[in-house]
Image: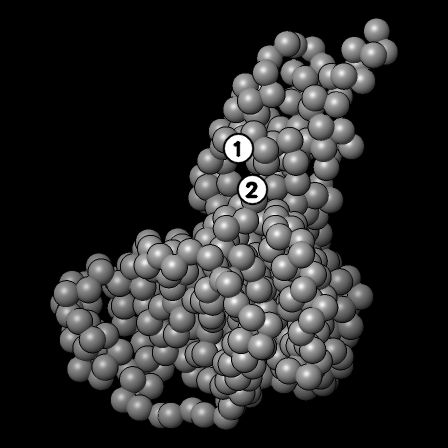
Amino acid sequence: MYTVVVADDEEELRKGIINRIDWEEIGFEVVGEAENGIEALEQVEKKQPDLLLTDIRMPFVSGIELARQVREIRPATQIAFLSGFDEFSYAQQAIQYNIISYMLKPITMADLKKQLQEIKKKIDYVFEEFESRKQEMTNVHEFVMPLLLDSYGKTDDMDREALMQERAFTCGLIRNKNHSFQYVVLAVALQDAQGKNRTSAELVHSVDMILKKYVGYYSFYMEGRIISLLLATRGAFDKYLHIMVKDIVQSTERILGMKCTIGVSRIQQKLVECHEAYGDAMGALGYGRVGESGIHYIADEERMSTGDMTGVQETVAELENLIRSGTRGELETYLGKIYSAMGEEHAQIKLRILMIQTMSSVFRLVHAVTNEYTVLQKFCYPKGSYQEMKEQFTELCMEAREVINAGKKKSSQKLCEQVMHIIEKEYADSELSLIGVSGRINVSPNYLSALIKKETGMSFIDSLTKKRIESARELVMGTSMKVREIAERCGYSDQHYFSYCFKKFCGLSPNQMRQQMQAAE
């Protein structure tokens, strides 16, 4: 049963659609309704429907703008337009947001039902394709695997890059030699409700179903992860990268019923740098929490590249993950397993080697995240008896975890303070947005949105609206400015939308508040 939100400012039509269609018969359940674009966006964010059925002309936020914002917060939701405007320009704008259906008013309930049945078939196809088990080995695979897993030498070697470009074109990864592509690597892991890794080769096609809507790509399965190499222009990555990764997470949760964690590399300029991007993606994946979905950009988590991860032993890699994001108990348990597995023969040598490798990794991690590694400098070289080294090693791992967590918290607070400062100073700018601000402070929209929510308990738009309306309220009560002038002063280009937000926030419209204040004098 697919879920749907119905949005139309004509109440009679909206209620008619909801009440006169046998939704269950055609495989849908109405979970929400809205009379304007703002309410529709709120319903999509709250209800997470499979389908949004909306009029293209809506108060406050048009259907086209609504589609754009839905793609930002809920890219897995399908959108169908009802429109009284048979204009090609509207259809053109609708296409860029992957609109599943475009229906013209007036429309009878019988015709609408037929259209909804067709929409269901399309959604069925998306679900079936996402679940289908297809994976084709091609010449591209033979090129991409060593490209990501092996180092191709110095990235400033023009001859080496030219050779890689030629090979990429020959195998079909790149179809145009005169391209302006840049590259990103994703590392995707799926878990069940118990936190057990359920990533499999059969699910590669599911990830590809999402990627093909946005960028060039090649994906493969390796050691419990789905690895995807993405190819696109810088503009396309800026516009779609945060949307496509969220689409993968949401579709995985909705269709497969599993948790999804994605590690995202930095954007690289050259093919020969894709090996480093792979290391970054795997490093970013390590910041995920067991049993939780999440999107982790290495540029958000670490201010410098994680470098070459492929030569690090599995034990060190797991320690890195636990130091990054594990609990103290999880780290203690894993260290206990390490010590138990050491055995008696050559245990001291084995532990010394592991400590040296881990120290290098830990110092790099701490430096990348916080640059506050003074507290760890006492761990210069493992020495003493086996028992003494165990105590040193345990202390090193625990203190590194505390330093990294403190550094991440401090960094998060600073970023949040920076955003709040921007809102405080620039709330009057009607173009101020989450994407614009995230670009200015060099973090992803996904990361910034989650950070603000965690630090303040409110979303970016809620924080911005709160500031705007608080300022507007002061002007309403303390000046004789016209409502239209106050709206413009506080970042609202539409006076009616301003009044709607003001009343929703304050309980009264601007004029009602003034009248109430004057009556009390």
Q: Is mark 2 on a helix, strand or loop?
A: loop
Residue lying farthest to the top in this orientation: 521
253 and 387: which is toward the camera: 253
- Vertical comparison of 159 with 239: above or below: below
Q: Residue at 80% of width from left, 18% of height from top?
A: 516
The N terminus, quarter of image: bottom right
Q: Is residue 203 above or below residue 491?
A: below
Q: Position of residue 378 (x, y in %)?
A: 64, 50
Instruction: Looking at the picture, tell me which residue is in the foreground, 507 or 205.
Output: 507
Up/down of 462 relative to 346, above or below? above
Real-space Cα separation, disc 2 to disc 1, in angstroms: 7 Å
Classify mark 1: helix, strand or loop.
loop
Asked if residue 161 lies left or right of residue 365, the reply is left
**Disc 2 residue crowd, few under 14, some 14–19, many 20+, Cα 10 Å:** many
Q: What residue type is labelled 2?
A: Phe
Residues tagged 2 and 1 counted as in contact (Cβ below 8 A):
yes
Quadrant (top left/top right/bottom left/bottom right) for the C terminus: top right
For residue 494, the mark is: 1
Foreground residue among 119 and 382: 119
Q: Position of residue 319 (x, y in %)?
A: 64, 68
Q: Which residue is drawn at 71% across and 28% down?
A: 509
Tag 2 residue: 60
Residue 193 visible in the displayed image: yes
The disc, 2 or 1, on the residue closer to the chain's N-terminal end is 2
